[in-house]
Amino acid sequence: MLTAHDQDPAAPSAAAPLRIALMSCAHTHAAAYAAQLAPRGDVELVVADPDGFGDLHRARVVGSYEEAWNTWPGGPDAIIVTSANAHHRDLVLEAARRGVHVLCEKPLATTVADAEAMVAVCREAGVVLMTAFPVHFSPAVQALRTAVADGTLGEVIGLTGTNNGKLPAGRDWFTDVELAGGGSLVDHTVHIAEILDSAFGAPATVHAVSNRILYADRAGEGAETGGLVTLTYDSGLVATIDCSWSQSADAPTWGGLRLQAVGTGGQLQIDAFAQHVGGPGTWLPYGTDLDALLLDAFLDAVRAGEAAPPTGEVGLRTVRVVAAAQESVRTGQPVPLG
Amino acid sequence: MTSTSPPAALRVGIVGTGGISRAHLPGWREIGAELHCHSHEGAEDFAASSGAVVHGTLEELLAAVDVVDVCTPTPSHPEVVRAALEAGRDVVCEKPLALDPEVARELAAHAERVGRRLFPAHVVRFFPQYEAAERALDAGAIGTPAVLRFERTGSLPDRSWYADESLSGGIVMDQMIHDIDQALWLAGPVERVFAQQSIAASDSAVRTAHVVLTHASGALSHCRGFWGPTGTAFRYTFDLAGDGGRLQYDSAGDPGIMFDAVASHRQASGAGFLPDVSTLRDPYAAELVEFIAARADGSDARVTPADGVRAVEVASAALESLRTGRSIAC
């Protein structure tokens, strides 16, 4: 059903609450986003839980996507896609068809073709497409971008990034290669790839190796659990991402994200999740709420009708990096990015 | 009752009296060695501070000693090692044994053939942090090793030959070979090597290398070397993840002694070429003591000639990867 509202997606009234549908509870971030959005006075939230996970209680929950689309007579202003990765595409294409803005969980898609289609269709429809990279908003990551841009580090020649975590828990699809698109190479390469993209642009070549030793008894069949992805840039810069699920199961926190940049002006090391009060077996994080900053940026973009970083385009570029990494694992050789 | 004279001191001939030879001095003193030296330059200075007897030629030195300690620039390692072996001397040789794996293999075979000992000085195996990790891995502390990372940061040694890749092998062969050896020690033989290097366009002394190793066991290693700008502090780290646990070490986070910012301004810092080992059991001394003990009882040392050869083979494959941009089987 098309309405007047749907035909003018770029201009929801500034005064009216934004109508947001959270599409699927498959991704564990759905609960975090719902917890942020449900109490806000400027948002009306509905959550679709078509798989019946039934573990999200802080919002109005409906049992199908159709009910979520039809919650309001004019439909939602925007959706947040938190389905299994392989289902992102259909939800995003449907949103574009309805003229609805989108924040899509990372990775944007499980194939380059899907990601390209999503970006193209949203552009044609004039709807905002952003990719959910909360670490983009980390003050530590911003400090890195600033130090690169303002010359503090001189000529930056190398980076090492680690995004290590435990095996994703709570939802089995995270390590199902069909639904997730792969294992740790998919799950934990894109965050750092996005940060590097925001500071240095797209890489020229991608080399990757992977294995399946960590959590081998619990990961889905065929899913890699360890990996090293090496990127080169036309400037000569070399960067390696350790995307392994190498955080021990008994560690007091899920994992973390670190980057070290080295240059003629010295070195900078950032740890986006370092801020915590600790004790034996205890980890009390007190850092900036990155989900809140991501959602603020998205809601502002919806009101403005214009995407802000991290965009769908950067989501697509990081999917290209992952696809090249997977090809490199298959061939054993570095893969040029087109 | 007959009187016995004290055992004669071990006679050690240090060839090449640059930076690394001075790091070896405390070890030779601990052993009680009688020191001899020969060098193209700096021998008199070295003798003045060490008490070594200076020899004008290598032949003269070889005739006067039991053990030769090769501390020359890398390109002359093979000729000095060969001469020492031919003279019937046991040899300690700084890393890398040689730049060319074929030559390294030939040196190991030469020692075997003449029945002399050859000790490649991969000193990092004698740093207590790496010793602790190796013992723990051996005892199964991390289960099966899966993804290992090694970082080494310093500044370009202040000797022009280091900067000439054809002489030193560059950052991979000179600096990173320590961590390549660690990866081999901790995770076993390597089947594939991929390497990338970046040299600053604005300052060729500043350079970094990334080397990714695929071990026969399936484990993966990442070695990251960095020669930073002047003033860069020496730092080394490792992160060893396995299916049964994880071990991490960072020399920058090892503050047994911490000066605050005010005090550290008045505190001399190292040159960034060699690590500060003042708070450790001196690993250079531990290395030489173990080599000499192994020489005495005929046992294998912690670093065998084959280990020295393997490190050169993997580093050489990394250099081939740098040249070709390809992943190299080895």
Image (spheres, grey):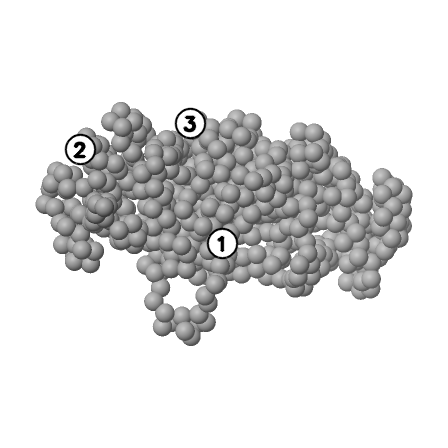
Q: Chain of mark 3?
A: B
Q: Which residue was labeled with disc 3?
A: B330
Q: Is residue A293 above or below residue A186?
A: below
Using the image, determine if residue B291 lies above or below residue A147.
above
Q: Residue at x 23, y 46 (%)?
A: B1
The answer to whether marks 1 and 2 sit on the same chain is yes
- Helix, strand or loop under label 3: loop
Residue B278, position in %: x, y? Answer: 38, 59
Q: Amino acid at mark 3?
A: Cys
Q: Nearer the viewer, mark 1 or mark 2?
A: 2
Dot placed on the residue nearer the N-terminal end, 1 or 2? 2
At 48% from the left and 63% from the top, the residue drawn is: B256
Q: Does residue B157 lie above or below B324 as drawn?
A: below
Please state the horizontal and vertical placement of residue A220, each as a whole percent of the image.
71, 33
B284 displayed left or right of A143 = left
Question: Label 2 neighbourhood size at 10 Å, few (<14), some (14-19), many (20+)?
Answer: some
Query: Is any atom of residue A51 visible in this view?
Result: yes
Residue furthest out toward the bottom:
B262
Question: Is residue A7 at all visible to an observer of this figure?
Answer: no
* Numbered mark located on residue B87 in the image: 2
**Mark 1 closeness class: few <14, some 14–19, many ≥20 residues within 10 Å:** some
Q: Element type at marker 2? A: loop
Residue receiving disc 1: B250
Image point (75%, 37%), residue name: A173
